[in-house]
Image: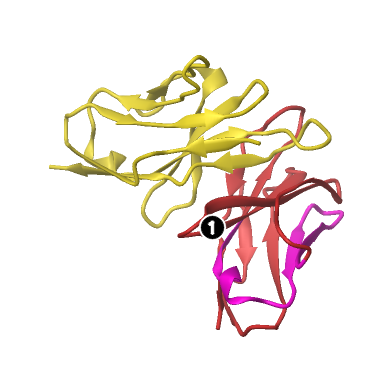
Amino acid sequence: KAGVTQTPRYLIKTRGQQVTLSCSPISGHRSVSWYQQTPGQGLQFLFEYFSETQRNKGNFPGRFSGRQFSNSRSEMNVSTLELGDSALYLCASSTQTGGYNEQFFGPGTRLTVL
Amino acid sequence: AQRVTQPEKLLSVFKGAPVELKCNYSYSGSPELFWYVQYSRQRLQLLLRHISRESIKGFTADLNKGETSFHLKKPFAQEEDSAMYYCALSGHGVTGGGNKLTFGTGTQLKVEL
């Protein structure tokens, strides 16, 4: 099976712009989670989508949003970018049969905000 | 609130020496704990989870609820064990289910020859 893929791998934006990141989960996986990784804060949970519905949400401002499509692919959007949004954004997918299921991570999208 | 603490940013050991990566957690419910590993230029991947009670690549971790700890151990370190290790806790969202991991800040393990 192909692993989780994320596009683009690298992005450079300027403050005030918006950005959309994409994640394609492993075939058959219906849950997609997003994480932000920074040197200062480490890995932080953004949100999780399952069957096109946001199921869990982390403590991030409303500028961070996401969605999931019927084929389980997911996008996350960050509006009005700030310098502090520079980070590696990781996507993870899993099956969902109840409780916690192993998450498989993608390679990440490196976002740099200038 | 749930929290995972990994007190060591870097742990350096010699090949063949025992390894212990520390992890403490704070969680009001019944926790589910994991260790994730990231080798150089590779993706983050699950190493082991406490409910499996298995040894992976020689690593074991025991959940100690009294001490709220989940330390990762290996009796004899190998060069290929050099990597970044993250302890993580699965919290449940509003719906009571789903996948929501709280990660520690990670410990870089360096195994020297």
In the image, residue B8 lies in the stretch drawn in magenta? no
The three-letter amino acid code for the residue at tag 1 is: Gln
**Image coordinates for residue B27, horizontal then vertical, percent:** 62, 28
Q: Nearer the viewer, residue A72 or A43?
A: A43
For the residue carrying disc 1, how many other residues have a C-alpha within 10 Å: few (<14), some (14-19), or many (20+)?
A: many
Q: Residue at horizontal 87%, vertical 49%?
A: A53
Residue drawn at x 82%, y 59% as measured from the top left: A67
| Residue at (72% x, 78% y) in the render | A80
Q: Nearer the viewer, residue A100 or B6?
A: B6
B63 vs B58, left or right, is right
Q: Is residue B30 above or below residue A50?
A: above
What residue would you read off at disc 1?
A37
Residue A113 horizontal side relative to residue B74, left or right? right
Question: Is residue B74 visible from the viewing direction of this image?
Answer: yes
Whether residue A71 sits left or right of residue A43 in the image: it is right
Colour chain A is painted in:
red
Taking depth in this image into account, of A72 and A44 the one nearest to the observer is A44
Q: Quadrant of residue B91?
A: top right
Q: Position of residue B107 (x, y in %)?
A: 37, 43
Identify the image quadrant of residue A34. bottom right
Magenta span: A63-90
Is residue B20 rendered to the left or right of residue B101?
left
Tell me the quarter of the image containing the C terminus of chain A. bottom right
**Parent chain of label 1:** A
Residue most toward the left? Answer: B113
Tell me residue A52's x, y (percent): 86, 51
Residue B58 visible within the image: no
Residue A26 in percent (x, y) is at 67, 48
Chain drawn in yellow: B
Q: Is residue A68 magenta?
A: yes
